[in-house]
Image (cartoon, rainbow, N blue to C red):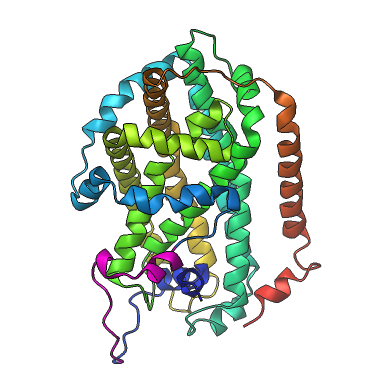
Amino acid sequence: MPEEDRKPGPWSIAKSITSGEPETTNIPEPEKPETIAELTEKDKKDMDPWVPDVMKPLLSVRRELAALPDLQKKLANQETEYSDFTSKAGYALSLGLKEKEIFFFGGMQWLAVAIAYLLWTQMLFWIPPDVWEALSNQDGAGPIDYALIVWAFVCVGVAAFPIGIFSGCMGVTHFLHKQGRASTVAMCLKLSLPNAWPLWAFHWTDGWITVRQIMSRLPRDNDTRSPAQILYEEALYYAWKVGIAGVLPSMVLGKGMIESGKESIAFVRQHAKEIIKLRAAYSGYCWILGVLAYVAGIPLMMYLDDGTGMGINIAMFYFYMAGPIFFAVGLIMFFLRPIYLLSLCNLYSDYLKANNKTVELPDNPPRAISALVVFAILCIAVLVVFYFREAIGLVDILSTV
């Protein structure tokens, strides 16, 4: 069984967050590898997450990217050079002040994340209180874990469509500015929507990998991962984020999934040092905001711990955590992410110029119709599950111990 399938599910992680210190046992554990070099090829392969077939070529190059000297050096050096990020902020802020629709695009992405998060928390309230109590002494929740994972995957997909489209709009704004053309919300949407399918698939995949990595970093009971596996997971995640640096600007210019992946690898190879430094600083700022949001939840955990057991407390915890989480995500979507994406697009423009490649923005809105239809069907399916959860048997699944 792959390591991915043996990991604790969302219920187990939530339980460890709200239940205090994990229980300890006296059962001796076998020695675990301490360094990445001690991991076998099977260990490394088992840690690969599931992604659509079209994204597997990108996923397969993570190991190659993780071996880049500049990336290895950055992983070994824990000090983040935030000046590499702030030095790029000037261009992004000046463009944002000139083309104010950039902040609108950031706001729409923030709204998509907020809706998806609140949608996911609803399933926690569908679990009966007596089931919470019955499972309070168990390490896993079986069907409940699987239901939460599927629901989380769907919620990520719902958020990924608007995030992909409006991220593409930010890239369009940059390329229009470089061409000296006027940029409006309507124009950016017209030029971004033709790439709806690849933008949606890419951001769904990237969003799922990001959510899984965030969940893996949370404290949990009975974590069976070795130190080497944890380090390798972080290295692969960082390599993924560096490797996809050129995917968005490439898609904005009309390239498909596979072609954008190949173009991104070539882009990263030529500008590895700049991209790694930029990504490290961006991740550092996001990490700080994430820690602050988590710390803000400590008083909340103390407030909800009324001594009556977990009960509905887990659902209430995640629901009330929406406040600090939305505040942190708002800062990222309105300020940090636009700076990061526009800086990558600017660097990508330099890459195109150095390689004598032309910049052509696609203009074929009918290509977006099929993606919009499928997204609408997905949203309708989510609403059906939300309003008819009892009729389709979902409540019975969530009531199974």
> In the depicted view, which residue is nearer to us: 215 or 387?
215
Does residue 364 show up? yes
Q: Residue furthest front?
A: 356
Whether residue 168 sits left or right of residue 324 in the image: it is right
User: Horizontal and vertical percent for residue 47?
Assistant: 43, 65
User: Horizontal and vertical percent for residue 318?
Assistant: 50, 60
Residue 260: within the magenta? Answer: no
Q: Residue furthest bottom?
A: 27
User: Horizontal and vertical percent for residue 375?
Assistant: 71, 43
Does residue 210 show up? no
Residue at horizontal 74 percent and vertical 59 percent from the top: 385
Position above or below: 153 against 103: below
Question: What segment carries the magenta color?
Answer: 27-47
Quarter of the picture holding the C terminus = bottom right
In the rendered image, which quarter is residue 304 located in?
A: bottom left
Q: Could you tell me how many numbered marks the image carries?
A: 0
User: Horizontal and vertical percent for residue 390?
Assistant: 77, 68
Residue at horizontal 76 percent and vertical 39 percent from the top: 373
Position above or below: 296 against 184: below
> In the depicted view, which residue is nearer to us: 265 or 236?
265
Position above or below: 17 against 258: below
Residue at horizontal 62 percent and vertical 17 percent from the top: 187
